[in-house]
């Protein structure tokens, strides 16, 4: 009797979880995701543009400043300097430079399609842009940092079963 009771309880819990899942799936808004190219390092709800291609011409970037007239309208970099946001952004989000990497100064700007990027001395690229967040139902400013990474080998790993 105890065994049949526990299996009924398990079945009840399983059906309840399924019903709750269906309820939330049907309640969630159906919105078309933004059409932004490939993602880079960013929050899961944000999508980022494709990184700058190497053959894009490098243009001169404005000189960084340490005392901006309106700090909340500028991007603050890890070395304490400020730069204007790119791509029409008025009030940029915080820049999250990888803490394990030393900051590299900006040496110019490049365009990738219709997205403007700052190019750093070590090849890193950073940008700001407005991205539609379906969970918020509006556009928000985001910053992206794209770091060049070596291409992973496609050779099979020994013992992986792929020959």
Image: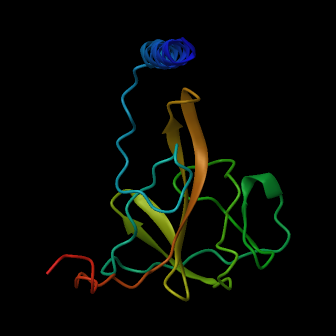
Tell me if residue 48 comes above or below residue 82 in the rendering: above
Q: Residue furthest front?
A: 1
Q: In the image shown, does 92 or 148 lie closer to the viewer?
A: 148
Q: In this orientation, does residue 35 appear?
A: yes
Residue 75: x and y in percent read 70, 62
Q: Residue at x 81, y 64 (%)?
A: 68
Quarter holding the N terminus is: top right
Residue 125: x and y in percent read 51, 73
Q: Residue furthest left?
A: 163
Counting the numbered discs, the total is 0
Tell me if residue 121 comes above or below residue 31 in the rendering: below
Residue 17: x and y in percent read 51, 19
Q: In the image shown, does 99 or 104 lie closer to the viewer?
A: 99
Tell me if residue 28 comes above or below residue 80 in the rendering: above
- Please give left or right for residue 63 compared with residue 26 in the image: right
Please identify the quarter of the rendering in which residue 120 is found.
bottom right
Q: Residue at x 65, y 47 (%)?
A: 90
Which of the colour schemes (rainbow, by chain, secondary structure, one colour) is used? rainbow
Q: In the image shown, does 26 or 123 lie closer to the viewer?
A: 26
Quarter holding the C terminus is: bottom left
Q: In this orientation, does residue 70 appear?
A: no
- Please give left or right for residue 106 compared with residue 34 in the image: right
Residue 9: x and y in percent read 55, 14
Tell me if residue 61 comes above or below residue 4 in the rendering: below
């Amino acid at each position: 009797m105890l065994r049949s009771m526990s299996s009924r309880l398990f079945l009840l819990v399983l059906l309840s979880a399924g019903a709750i899942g269906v309820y939330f799936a049907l309640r969630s808004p159906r919105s078309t995701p933004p059409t932004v190219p490939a993602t880079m390092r960013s929050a899961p709800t944000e999508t980022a543009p494709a990184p700058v291609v190497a053959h894009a011409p490098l243009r001169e970037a404005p000189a960084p400043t340490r005392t901006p007239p309106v700090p909340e309208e500028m991007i603050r970099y890890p070395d304490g300097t400020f730069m204007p946001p790119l791509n029409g952004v008025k009030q940029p989000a915080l820049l999250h430079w990888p803490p394990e990497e030393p900051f590299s100064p900006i040496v110019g700007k490049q365009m990738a399609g219709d997205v403007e990027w700052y190019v750093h001395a070590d090849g890193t690229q950073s940008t700001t842009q407005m991205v539609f967040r379906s969970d918020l139902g509006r556009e928000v400013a985001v910053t992206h940092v794209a770091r060049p990474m070596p291409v992973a080998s496609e050779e099979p790993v020994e013992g992986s079963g792929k020959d």
